[in-house]
Image (spheres, rainbow, N blue to C red):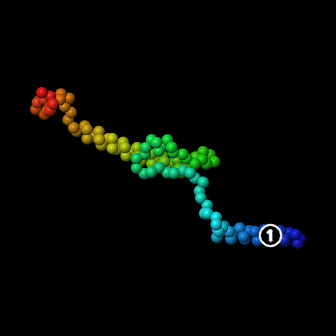
Amino acid sequence: MILVLVILAVLAVGLCAAALVLRTGVPGVADPVTSESFEPLDRGGVRPDTLIELRFDQAVRGYRMSQVDSVLDQLAEELRDRDHEIASLRAELADVPVDFTGRGAEGEPARGDV
């Protein structure tokens, strides 16, 4: 019976010491860091080289879904912006008259044609 009480006392002291260390930290030991190596994409234009070098952290069943979802959301937003810009540029070009004859507005030869 005394042996059981001694073991319980040692466990209680150990648990108290562990709780104290976890709350206050250990002097000389750096704060814990994450094991995630994922670096999110920069806002703005995404270059092909950036996507080629992109690596996601692996989880138990594949990749971390939050990382993949954030990259896909950003890519969708940038593709939407590019599509909008392409559509507006095409609309501007549609309004510009094209003269395939090489002549000016009144049938005169263009500069350099003599």
The amino acid marked with disc number 1 is: Val
Please report the residue visible at 14 percent of the width from the left and 32 percent of the height from the top: 111
Residue 19: x %, y % from top left: 69, 69
* Residue tagged 1: 10
**Number of numbered discs on residues:** 1
- Quadrant where the C terminus lies? top left
Q: Is residue 110 above or below residue 54?
A: above
Please report the residue visible at 21 percent of the width from the left and 38 percent of the height from the top: 96
Q: Is residue 37 above or below residue 83?
A: below
| Foreground pick, 1 / 29 | 29
Q: Going by the image, does 81 lie left or right of 70?
A: left
Q: Is residue 103 visible?
A: no
| Foreground pick, 19 / 84 | 19
Residue 76: x %, y % from top left: 43, 45
Residue 82: x %, y % from top left: 37, 43
Q: Is residue 25 above or below residue 110?
A: below
User: Outermost residue, front direction?
Assistant: 28
Please report the residue visible at 43 percent of the width from the left and 45 percent of the height from the top: 46
The quadrant holding residue 26 is: bottom right
Q: Going by the image, does 89 lie left or right of 27?
A: left
The quadrant holding residue 86 is: top left
Q: Going by the image, does 102 lie left or right of 63?
A: left
Q: Is residue 95 visible?
A: yes
**The residue tagged with tag 1: helix, strand or loop?**
helix
| Foreground pick, 28 / 90 | 28
- Residues packed near mark 1 inside 10 Å, few (<14), some (14 to 19) or many (20 plus): few
Residue 55: x %, y % from top left: 54, 45
Q: Going by the image, does 111 lie left or right of 27?
A: left
- Quadrant where the N terminus lies? bottom right
User: Outermost residue, right direction?
Assistant: 1
